[in-house]
Amino acid sequence: MDFMKKLLSCICIANVLCILNVHAQKDSNFISFHSQATSISQVHPQFKSPYAGQNSFQSNEGIASSLTNTLFFAIHPWNNGLVIVNPEVAGGVGLSGTTGIAGFPNGEIFRVGNPKPTIYLARLILEQRIPLDGSNKYIADDANVVRGFYPENYLKFFAGRFCLADYFDGNPYSHDPRSQFMNWSFMSAGAWDYAADTRGYTWGVGAEWKNKNWRIAAAAALEPAVANALDFDMHLDKALATQIEFTHYYSINNLPGQLQATFFLNRAHMGKYNEAVAINPLQPDITSTANYSNHKKGFVINAAQQLNKYLGAYTRISWNDGQNETWAYTEIDRSINIGFQYDKEPSTETNVLGFGIVMNGLSKPHRNYLAAGGYGFIIGDGKLNYAPEVIAECYYRFSFFSDHLQISPDYQFVLNPAYNKDRGPVHIFALRTHIEL
């Protein structure tokens, strides 16, 4: 297809520039330049589908592919300061137009109708660390990191355009769909409806305090003007996402672990499920009840533990009140996720096996709205025979050339897609190729 050829050309040009710049600045403690390119192709066989609505996962469709290329450009302009600029190119399509499963199977695809490759600004961040004592540690050159010594205990301020998942809900085993689990409800907490535009980014400010084994982070960020939109709502007194997170790092028998709690409050011009059904019981429309007085609150519990030299495990539990419209991420009000990661002996090329399972659920007002024939921007079959959406995912990541090339076959089993036990189950097969420079 033409758009795939254009996107591949953009990726090749960008990565050639990246290679030249990496060689030019490989010993620099002032500048860092890296790149990534990821392609994911997914397909599924036909499944039981006695009826379908406008947002249903399609039983009969072909292969869907996505491609992204990101340039990670970072400058260390002054002591403990960092400027990050990430232009990004993305194109392709998701299965069923990126609808029909709340825990969508491809974390690299966006809810953008145009599949043609598009260049946009992913990140533009200014960070400043203030040391809390004289301790420093060396950080190697990496994506969005300039090599050098940085305060080990610090107060950090950040502002600009970023993804909230850059600073919150971090997990060493399940956080990056480019190299770990691909499913949306694995890469981030499913019920955390974090503020973002259609591509997953927002504008905001935040701070992070890190002292020995403790970390506290907080941020305020812009909400989209309407659900799943590219434009932001500038009525900051009425529409704003706030979150605070507490993390404790520890070790058991010299094996690292972490325990994390995140609390969030999202205010936006969103609709209320119960009101929409009361106004129109036969064909409710959530947008007809939009009001700035509506909000969404919730929490995430996130834990990770290395079990032995090769095996690590994690769990996420997330919840939101589910009274008002899903606004930015996906239609999940309750979620519990557990998974494991197995690594061979660490080396320059480490193969990884990952397995996880997640159970997603909806609040009663949300499920009543869908059962009455309502639609969100991700799911809606026209009616609903409710059951929790259960997804299992397994991937194996082959690594080559010191981890610069990674190839990952992936399988996902989806029971009750979009919480509807009348449909499915769905078997999804994928192949991911990831390049890091």
Image: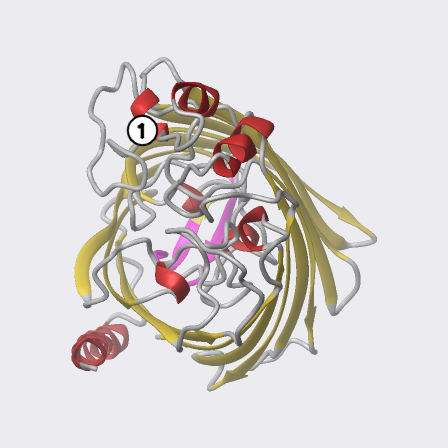
Graded by Cα atoms within 10 Å as few (under 14), some (14 to 19) or many (20 or more), the crowding at tag 1 reads some
Whether residue 141 is visible to the viewer of this picture, yes or no, is no
At a point 53% along the width and 50% down the height, the residue shown is 418
| First to last magenta residue range | 135-149
Asked whether 148 falls inside the magenta stretch, the response is yes
Q: Number of labelled discs?
A: 1
Screen quadrant of the N terminus:
bottom left
Considering every residue shown, the one lying at the far bottom of the view is 401
At a point 19% along the width and 67% down the height, the residue shown is 116
Residue 274 location (% of width, % of height): 48, 21
Side of 157 where 78 appears, left or right: left
Side of 341 where 94 appears, left or right: left
At a point 44% along the width and 59% down the height, the residue shown is 107
Give the residue type that dot 1 points to: Thr
Side of 136 where 387 appears, left or right: right
Residue 230 location (% of width, % of height): 22, 43
Screen quadrant of the C terminus:
bottom left
Location of mark 1 (residue): 287
Whether residue 68 is visible to the viewer of this picture, yes or no, is yes
Residue 234 location (% of width, % of height): 20, 25
**Quarter assignment of residue 298:** top right
Q: Residue 101, relative to residue 249: is it above or below?
A: below
Asked whether 281 falls inside the magenta stretch, the response is no
Q: In this view of the protein, which residue sits in the foreground, 194 or 72?
A: 194
Principal secondary structure, stretch drawn in magenta: loop
Q: Secondary structure at mark 1?
A: helix
